[in-house]
Image (spheres, rainbow, N blue to C red):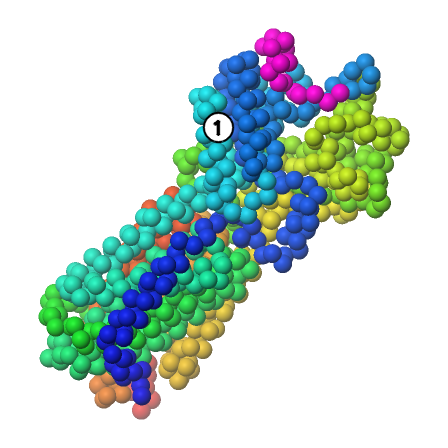
Amino acid sequence: MTLSHLPLRLPHWLALMMLLSLQLIAAGLLPQLHINNAPEVYFPQNAPAVQFETGLRAEFPSDEMLIALFEGDTVLELDFLQRLQALARGLALEPDVDRVLSLPTFDTIRGTADGFSVEALLDSALAEELSMEQRRERVLQDRFAPGLLVSQQADAVALGVRPVAMDSSVQRLALERTVREAITDAGLEPQLTAISGQLPLDVAQVRAMMRDSLVFIPGTLAIGMLLLWWLFRRWLVLVAAALVIGATINISLGLMIVIGKPYTLISAILPPLLSALSIALLIHWFNALSHAAQLGLSGRERVQRALEWVARPAFFTALSTSVGLASLSFSPIQPVATFGWVAAAGVGALFVVTIGLLPTLFVRWDRGVWPNRRQGIGRLQRVISGLSVLGMRRAPWVVGISIILFVFLVPQIFKIKTETDIFEFFKDQHPITLSTERIHERLTGVTTLDMVLDAEGRDSLMDPVRLQAIREFTDWLEARPEIDRAMSVADLIEEMHWAFNEEQPEFRRIPDSGPLIAQYLLLYDGDELHELVNREFDRTRIMLNLNIHGARAINQVMDAIEAQIAQQPVADMTVTIAGYGRLFADQEQLMISGQIRSLLSAVVLISLLMLLTWRSVARAGLSMIPNLAPVVVVFATMGLLGIWLDMATAMIASVTVGIAVDDTIHLLNGYWRRRRLGAPHVSALVRTYHTEGRAIVATTLLLCAQFMLLGLSPFIPTIEFGLLTALGLFSALVLDLLLLPALLTLINQRRRTEV
C-alpha cells in the first residue's frame, strides 16, 4: 500500500476526533509552559566555566545586579537621603533580595581614637549633622563610592539591588516590578533616570519575547489565512488550515512542556515558523485539489489524485525541513538545540496531520467549487512562466551570470564578524539601551568579571607578599581602558591600615606584618570583607566593572589578562576568570562551533536525503545547487551590511536550507514524473511550472511575508533573523524559477548531444 492510499482508509469521523484530540490535549498543557530566558538556560551546564561558576557562587554572592540611577541637584539633600534609606531598607526585606547597596547603607572605614570603625557612608542621621558641602566631600573622598554609588560630580547616586540566586526570568520580572513600585512609593520616581544591569536586561528580553509572541503568532496566522482566502475562496480551506496550524503549534509547545524545556527568545520563533510552514504545505495540498477539480474529478477520486501528486514530495520535503532544523540540535547553546529538534518534531507532526488526517475529511466534506485558473493562484502564472521560460531560452547566460554573481558574493562571507552584544540587541531608543548608556556615562560599566585567586592553605591570603601581589595585579587591571573599577581584598586591608593610623596618606598600603593584618581582619565587622574573600582566607576575588559588553571585546580583555598572568604570575596563586562576563563571552566560541557543526550536518544530511529521494548522485547534486546558493546570498549580505553572526542569525543557514529545498523537491518531482510518463523536456518543464510552480511561488511569498513580519520586533536579532531568512527564501525562489530550468535545459541538451 502506497503513501497516497493509506490516508483514505481512515474513517472521516476518526480522523476528525484525532485532529481535535491532538489540539485539546496539547492546548491543555499550555498553561504549564515555563517562560524563562534567564542567562543560565543558555550556558551548557557541563562546560568547565559553568561548573566553576557554580562552585564559586557557593562561597561568594552573585555578580548579578539591578542598578537604579537617580539624578539632580537634590540627591544629597536630607529629604532625598531619608527616602533613599527607607527605600533601601524596605527592599532589603524582600525575600528575593540578597543585598541593597546605597549611600545610606554602604560601609565605609574611618579612623577612631581606638583604631578604626566601620560605619554607614551617609545615612540620614549623619546627613542631618552635615552641611551639603560636607556630605559631598564625604562621599567623594570615600575610596569605593565614586563610580559605584555616586558620580564624580556628586549629582547622581545609584541604588544597587543584588537578588538571591535566581534561575527564572519570571522571578526577575517580578523583582524588577517590585523595585520600580518601591521607588514610586518612596517618592523618588522624579529623580529616577535609568535602570540597568544584568537583571533588567533579562527582563527587557522577556518583555520583547512576550510582545513578539502576542504580535507574531496571530500576525503570521492572519497573513496565511488571507493568502489562502485570496487563492482558494473556500471556507473549508480556512477551517482545515486553522485545525492543522493549531494542532501543529500546540503539539510542539506541548512537547517542550513534557520534556521540561523553557520557552525562550529563541523558541518564541517556533510558533510563527510552524504557522508559516503549515500554510506552505497546505497550499501545495489545496493546489493539488484545485488542479484535480479542474480535470473534472470529484469526491474520493479527486482526493486520491491530489494525494498521488502531493504525498511523496510532501514526505520528502517534511524530511528535508526536519533534517535542516534538527541540525541545530548540534549547537551547544541549549535553547538553539531545543528549537532545532522541537521544530523538526513539529514539521513531522504537520506532515502526519496534513497528509494523514485531512484527506479523508475532504472526501467527506469537499462539495464546493474550486477557483479556475484565472482566479486566485492562477494569477501568479504570468510571472512564473516569464522567469522559467527565460531560464530555458537563455540557459547559458543564466548559468554564467549566476556563477559571476556567486564569485563576487563568496568573498563577502569572510567579512562576517561573530559577535554577541545583548545591549546592542535593542534599538538605540529602547529604554534598556538608553539606561545602560546613562549609567556608563555617570558611573561605571555594568558588565562584570571576577578574577578568582586561589592560594594553598588556610589563612594564606593574610600573607603580606600575596596581598601585595594582588595589589599590583589590581592596579594593572584598573589601568586598562576597558575596566572602570577593580575592587579586591587588598583595598579593604589598605583602608583598615590607613584608618588605624589616623588616616595618614602614607599608611594607605599593605602592612608588612602578617599578624597585624590578622588583627585588622579580626576587628573588621562590615559586610564587604566576605564578599571578597572566603572565611578560610584561601580564596579571594577581584570584582571588575567593564565599560564594554560585547562578547568579542570581553574575550579580548580576557586574553590580555591571561597573557599578563602568564608573563607575570600573581605570586604563587592560581587565577581563574569567572563571572557573568566570562560565561557570556564563552558563548561566542560555542556559537561558532555550533554554527559550523549545524550547517555541515544540515548539508550532509539533506544531500543524503536527496540521494535517497532521487536515487541518483547527479540528481541529488543538482537539487542542492539552488538551495546552497541562498546560504551564500544570506551570509554575503551579512558581510556586506556588517550584520553580526549571533545566536539568532546563526540559525538562518540551517533553517533556510531546510525550507528552501522543499520547493526544489516539488519542482523536480513534477518534472521527472512527467518525463517518466514520456513528456519531452520543454513540455515537462512548462507543465511543471504551470502546476507546482504556482504553489511554490505562493508558499515562498507567504513564508517571506511571515518572516518579514518579524522585522516589527523591538529585538534586533529577531528582526535580522526574519529579514535575512526571507531574503534567503526569496533568492531560493528566484533560483528555482531561473537557474533550475536553465540547468535542466543544459543537462537535456548535453544528453541529446551525446546521443
- Number of labels in the image equals 1
Q: Position of residue 663 (x, y in %)?
A: 31, 70
> Which amino acid type is shown beneath numbered disc 1?
Ala
Q: Is 656 left, or right, of 154 in this rendering?
A: left
Q: Position of residue 269 (x, y in %)?
A: 39, 55
**Residues shaded magenta:** 117-136
Residue 258 shows up from this direction: yes
Judge by depth and name the residue closer to the eye, 324 or 33.
Answer: 33
- Residue drawn at point x = 34 percent, y = 67 percent: 22
Q: Is residue 277 above or below residue 96?
A: below
Judge by depth and name the residue closer to the eye, 61 or 738.
Answer: 61
- Residue drawn at point x = 78 percent, y = 15 percent: 112
Q: Position of residue 189 (x, y in %)?
A: 45, 24
- Residue drawn at point x = 48 percent, y = 33 percent: 178
Q: Quadrant of the N terminus?
A: bottom left
Q: Is 81 left, or right, of 1 in this rendering?
A: right
Pointer 1: residues within 10 angstroms few (<14), some, or many (20+)? some
